[in-house]
Image (spheres, grey):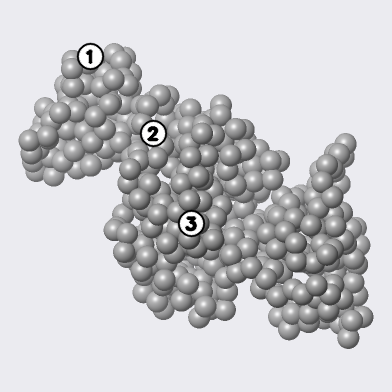
C-alpha cells in the first residue's frame, strides 16, 4: 500500500453515475460522504445503495459517511432572487418577515432561525455568505435586527449567517437531523458526522439517537464531530472524549474565528485527536479550483500536503467531487499529493513511547507491534481483529510499515477505511490460532502484499473470536506455515 492518508469524497450530481463512481473508487476514494444538507431521504438511500454496489464492483470496502445538516442559520428569499448591498447601507434581518409569504427586498429579509434577535446585541458583527458580506448590529427591536453594512456585495437567497466569535444558541441537532439519523441508520452508514456541536453533550445525544435508530440492524456508527463553532475550540478535549473523531471543518470555523486563526487550529486539533486515539479529517476548499479547472492551484497542492504532514487521517473533497467538472481527476490529484507528502514524513516512533505507561494489555500489544516492526524492518503488520481497535491504535503513530486489519466483520472493515495507514480485508476467524495465522498469511500472499521469506508481525487475541482481547504478538516468516 503506497498511500496511508485516506480520501473522503462527497457524492453528488457529478458523481452519481455508476461508472464515474467506480473510477473514483479505483482512483483512491476510501470514504464516500453523503451530504444531508441536500436531497430527500430516498435520494440518500439510493446513493448509499449505489456506493455499496460500486465498491463491490471494485473489490473494495468503502465506508459511507452521513453528514448531518445541523442548524445552518440562513436568511430567507428575495423578490428578485438577490440584492446588491453597498457599504454604509442600512439593512434589517427580521425573524417575522416571511411568515405571511413576504419576500426580502433592499431594506430587509426574513430569517429561518427565529431566535437570532435574542442572540445578538448592538456592536456584534454578523457574517453572511461565508463572510463575504459583513453587517454590524446597530440595535434590536422586537423581531428586527437593524444593521449597517460594513462590507457589501451581492446577497442572494438562503445564504448562511454566522456571528463573529460564535455565541449562537441554536442546538446542534435539529428535528431534521433526528429524522436524517434514522435514514442514515436504515442503510447502516459507517460514520455519522454531526454539524456544529458545542460540547460533549451534543455528541452524546447524537450517539444515543444513532444507536437507538441502528438497533434493529445491530449497527452502531462511529461518530465524527465537525468542529466549526468558536465555542467548540475550548471544549475540544471533551468533544473528542465523546466522539470517535473530528472533522476540521474550516469553512464556518474560519468565519467565526477568522481565517488567520485556522491553520494553527488545524494543527492543534489533528495533534489532539491523534494523542487521544481519535480520527481526524481535514475538509473545506482543499481543491476548490478543480470544480472548474482540470488542475489545482499550487496553494491547494500545499494545503493538502500540509494536512498530510500534520498527521490527518483523511483529506476531503466537497463540491469538487459532488458538483465539479473533474471529480475523477480531483481524486487522482489528491492521492498523488498524499503519496508525495508521506515520503517526507519524519518518523518519531521511539519518541512517542518515551515515558509512556500502558494501562491495557491490548493497547500494549498494539504498540509493541509498532516498535518491533519499525526496528526489525518487517514487510507488514497484521492485526487479526474483531472491533478494529488494535489497528486504530497502531494507526495513531507514523510508521513506514503498512498495517493490515484482517477481520470477520464487514462493518469493521468498512470503518477501518478511514484509519490512516490501515487497509482492511475480511477474513473469517475460527478458534485455532495456527489455522487462522496460516490463512492470514495466504491472504497476504494472494494479494501480492508479501511473498515467501518476508517477515511480518501479527497480533491477535487468545482465545480467538472475542472483542477487545488482543493479547498475543508473533513475528512470522512467510512460508513457515506452509
Residue at image mark 1: 139
Residue sitting at x 51%, y 34%: 201
Q: Is residue 374 visible?
A: no
Tell me if residue 323 comes above or below residue 171 in the rendering. Answer: below
Of callouts 1 and 2, the N-terminal one: 1
Q: Nearer the viewer, mark 1 or mark 2?
A: 2
Residue at image mark 2: 171
Residue at image mark 3: 214
Measure the C-alpha gap from mark 1 to mark 2: 25 Å
* Other residues around mark 2 within 10 Å, as few (<14) / some (14–19) / many (≥20): few
Compare residues 193 and 285 and report the one nearer the observer: 193
Q: Nearer the viewer, mark 1 or mark 3?
A: 3
* Other residues around mark 3 within 10 Å, as few (<14) / some (14–19) / many (≥20): many
What element does badge 2 sit on?
A: loop
**Image quadrant of residue 352?**
top right
Residue situated furthest bottom in the rendering: 482
Tell me if residue 276 comes above or below residue 185 in the rendering. Answer: above
Amino acid at each position: 500500500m503506497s498511500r496511508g492518508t485516506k480520501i473522503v469524497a462527497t457524492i453528488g450530481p457529478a458523481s452519481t453515475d455508476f461508472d464515474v463512481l467506480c473510477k473514483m473508487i479505483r482512483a483512491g476514494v476510501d470514504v464516500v460522504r453523503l451530504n444531508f444538507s441536500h436531497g430527500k431521504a430516498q435520494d440518500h438511500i439510493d446513493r448509499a445503495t449505489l456506493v455499496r454496489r460500486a465498491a463491490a464492483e471494485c473489490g473494495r470496502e468503502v465506508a459511507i459517511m452521513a453528514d448531518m445538516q445541523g442548524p445552518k442559520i440562513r436568511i430567507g428569499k428575495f423578490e428578485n432572487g438577490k440584492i446588491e448591498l453597498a457599504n454604509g447601507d442600512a439593512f434589517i434581518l427580521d425573524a417575522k418577515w416571511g411568515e405571511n409569504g413576504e419576500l426580502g427586498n433592499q431594506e430587509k429579509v426574513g430569517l429561518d432561525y427565529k431566535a437570532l434577535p435574542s442572540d445578538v446585541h448592538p456592536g456584534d458583527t454578523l457574517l453572511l455568505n461565508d463572510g463575504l458580506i459583513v453587517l454590524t448590529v446597530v440595535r434590536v427591536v422586537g423581531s428586527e435586527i437593524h444593521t449597517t453594512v460594513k462590507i457589501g456585495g451581492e446577497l442572494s437567497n438562503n445564504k448562511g449567517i454566522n456571528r463573529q466569535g460564535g455565541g449562537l444558541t441554536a442546538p446542534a441537532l435539529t428535528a431534521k437531523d433526528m429524522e436524517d439519523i434514522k435514514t442514515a441508520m436504515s442503510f447502516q452508514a459507517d460514520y455519522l458526522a454531526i454539524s456544529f456541536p458545542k460540547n460533549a453533550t451534543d455528541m452524546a445525544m447524537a450517539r444515543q439517537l444513532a444507536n437507538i435508530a441502528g438497533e434493529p440492524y445491530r449497527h452502531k456508527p462511529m461518530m465524527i464531530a465537525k468542529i466549526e463553532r468558536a465555542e467548540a475550540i475550548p471544549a475540544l478535549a471533551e468533544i473528542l472524549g465523546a466522539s470517535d473523531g473530528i472533522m476540521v471543518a474550516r469553512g464556518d470555523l474560519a468565519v467565526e474565528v477568522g481565517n488567520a486563526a485556522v491553520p494553527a487550529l488545524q494543527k492543534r486539533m489533528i495533534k489532539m485527536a491523534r494523542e487521544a486515539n481519535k480520527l481526524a479529517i481535514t475538509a473545506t476548499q482543499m481543491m476548490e479550483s478543480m470544480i472548474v479547472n482540470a488542475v489545482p492551484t499550487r496553494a491547494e497542492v500545499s494545503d493538502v500536503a500540509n494536512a498530510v504532514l500534520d498527521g490527518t487521517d483523511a483529506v476531503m473533497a466537497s463540491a469538487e467531487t459532488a458538483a465539479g467538472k473533474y471529480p475523477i481527476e480531483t481524486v487522482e490529484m489528491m492521492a498523488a499529493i498524499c503519496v508525495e507528502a508521506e515520503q517526507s514524513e519524519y518518523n518519531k516512533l521511539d519518541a512517542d513511547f518515551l515515558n509512556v505507561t500502558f494501562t491495557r494489555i491490548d493497547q500494549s500489544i498494539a504498540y509493541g507491534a509498532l516498535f518491533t516492526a519499525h526496528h526489525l524492518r518487517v514487510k507488514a503488520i497484521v492485526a487479526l481483529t474483531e472491533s478494529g481497535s488494535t489497528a486504530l491504535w497502531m494507526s495513531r503513530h507514523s510508521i513506514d510499515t503498512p498495517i493490515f486489519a484482517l477481520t470477520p466483520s464487514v462493518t469493521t472493515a468498512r470503518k477501518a477505511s478511514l484509519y490512516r495507514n490501515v487497509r482492511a480485508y475480511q477474513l473469517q476467524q475460527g478458534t485455532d490460532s495456527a489455522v487462522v495465522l496460516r490463512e492470514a498469511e495466504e491472504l497476504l500472499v494472494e494479494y501480492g502484499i508479501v511473498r515467501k521469506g518476508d517477515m511480518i508481525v501479527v497480533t491477535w487475541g487468545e482465545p480467538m473470536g472475542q472483542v477487545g482481547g488482543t493479547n498475543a504478538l508473533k513475528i512470522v516468516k512467510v512460508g513457515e506455515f506452509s
